[in-house]
Amino acid sequence: MSDPFILARQLSNLIFVDGELRPSTSSESIPVISPYSLEQIGSIPLCNEIDVHHAVQSAKKVQATWAQENPQRRSYLLRKCGESITAHAQELAHLMSLETGKALKTESLVELSVVEDTFQYYAGLTLELKGETIPYDPNILAFTIREPLGVIGAIIPWNVPLMLLAMKVAPALAAGNTVVLKASPEASLTVLRAAQLLGAILPKGVLNVITGDGLLTGDALVRHPDIAKVTFTGSVESGRKVNVNAAEKIIPVTLELGGKSPLIIYPDADIDRAAQDVVTGMRFTRQGQSCSASSRVFVHATLHDVFIQRVKQLLEKMVIGDPLDPHTDIGTLISKRQFDKVQSFLALAKADSGLHIHEVGNLPKNTRGLFHLPTLISGITNEHVLCQQEIFGPIMCVLSWDNEQGVIEQANATDYGLAAGVWAKDIAKALQAVKSLNAGFVQVNQYMVFRPSLAFGGFKHSGLGKEASKNTMIEHFTKEKLVLINCA
Ligand code: NAD
């Protein structure tokens, strides 16, 4: 396995275009800082409009050939892509932990296992791009054909970079499109290494990866005239800009945005299992940097105190430390910017004397790393800014309730609608809650499951459209052509 520090240097200042790692035409670069050591481990190009154009042209040149490729061949190549990622899982996971600060054991290696699953899932669907026949007139054969859209612009954040690469690239390619993917400036090196591995299997130009920020590079990609569709994952603020730019060009978009997800614990819930589930659901192992984190937990008043005690006991056992250490459960936050944002929310909480703040565990000693203790805030109401804004850090609000109708109203009272959870033994009651919760993904007596085939995406400000299933591939990566043949 390659040393992640050496790999980071080797991948520096490169992008993946036309089947090879190559320098960008831009003279500007962005430093890559390890969130654990705060030292620079590499740098990535700040791609300009020329780089974007080269990448889009590379994808455009081969798109028709790729679309006409026998679907079984596309399936075979996607399967090989999945296998290659798994064969390099250790190397990719180490690089990801170095670059993002995510713990190797609980996060990076776990993410890698989903990547192959996603490629295998879509490899099995290349033969499922079916149209339909329409009963219309005995002399006229009426049917539809599903065709690829063309060149897809895919834009991803840093929190699960390879899972999101797979969720966008695999269905887009399975459906006969080609892709230009813009990686996040905070997780580009891992994505570039994955692109190099995939590029050794795919025909050149089918997948291109560029690096840079949102304002220049991402914006240029969305506005490029040959981009036929944008699939975007990121914050509401950036998603709104992407949506406006796409609307100017009248092209479709899929937006997978932020969340402030509620989890409701009913009085009959198994509190030990629920507490364990919340620790997983809040993604404390990833410093809470998850779009679907259960960041608002509504606990019935009879269980409130015991719930807090159980969660604290579980969190106290977790090891916070060097992301690359195989014993570490919780790594660092992604960047100084994110660290400062989380700290400013904590400062707001500390300034409010009505709140109870439970900071749990021990920070590692002798490190400059961007660590933050898992934090529970109780005695809070849903109107508080900490319950309304996405913190994207390890701060979880715990709210006490005693009125069934009221708790559902509170759970729905945010701008977001990504995920929701219910813990209850009374399944009739749980089903009632499921029907009333305004979220794209609701789970009962479990939380935080992701698997290809389970379409993921949110309501309200959490996004437009879903991804990760057969239907979403057909809906979001193909267009329907109607054909009438007069046989008279
Ligand atoms: P971000 O919006 O700052 O950036 C996401 C990506 O968009 C980056 O590659 C960035 O460079 C690019 N970008 C930014 N502005 C752009 C613009 N105007 N035009 C084109 N591209 C632009 O988000 P982030 O901080 O990287 O990620 C965290 C956010 O992502 C959180 O809000 C989180 O909830 C969300 N997220 C959502 C999901 C989901 O599936 N719903 C999954 C993971 C993360």
Image (cartoon, grey):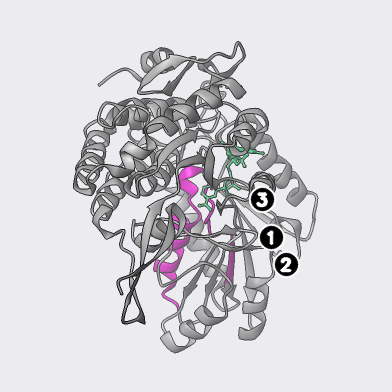
72 left or right of 282 in image: left
Cβ–Cβ under 8 Å for marks 2 and 1: yes
Residue nearest the observer in this picture, 93 or 462: 462
Residue 201 in percent (x, y) is at 25, 30
Residue nearest the observer in this picture, 60 or 207: 60
Tag shown at residue 247: 3
Q: Secondary structure at mark 1?
A: helix
Q: Amino acid at mark 2?
A: Thr
Q: Is residue 225 above or below residue 383?
A: above
User: Is residue 295 on the magenta stretch?
Assistant: yes
Residue 244 in percent (x, y) is at 69, 48
Residue nearest the observer in this picture, 223 or 215: 223
Region in magenta: 269-298
Q: CA distance from mark 3 to mark 2?
A: 38 Å
Q: Secondary structure at mark 3?
A: helix
User: Is residue 84 on the magenta stretch?
Assistant: no
Residue marked by disc 1: 387
User: Mark 3 or mark 1: which comes first in sequence?
Assistant: 3
Q: Amino acid at mark 1?
A: Cys
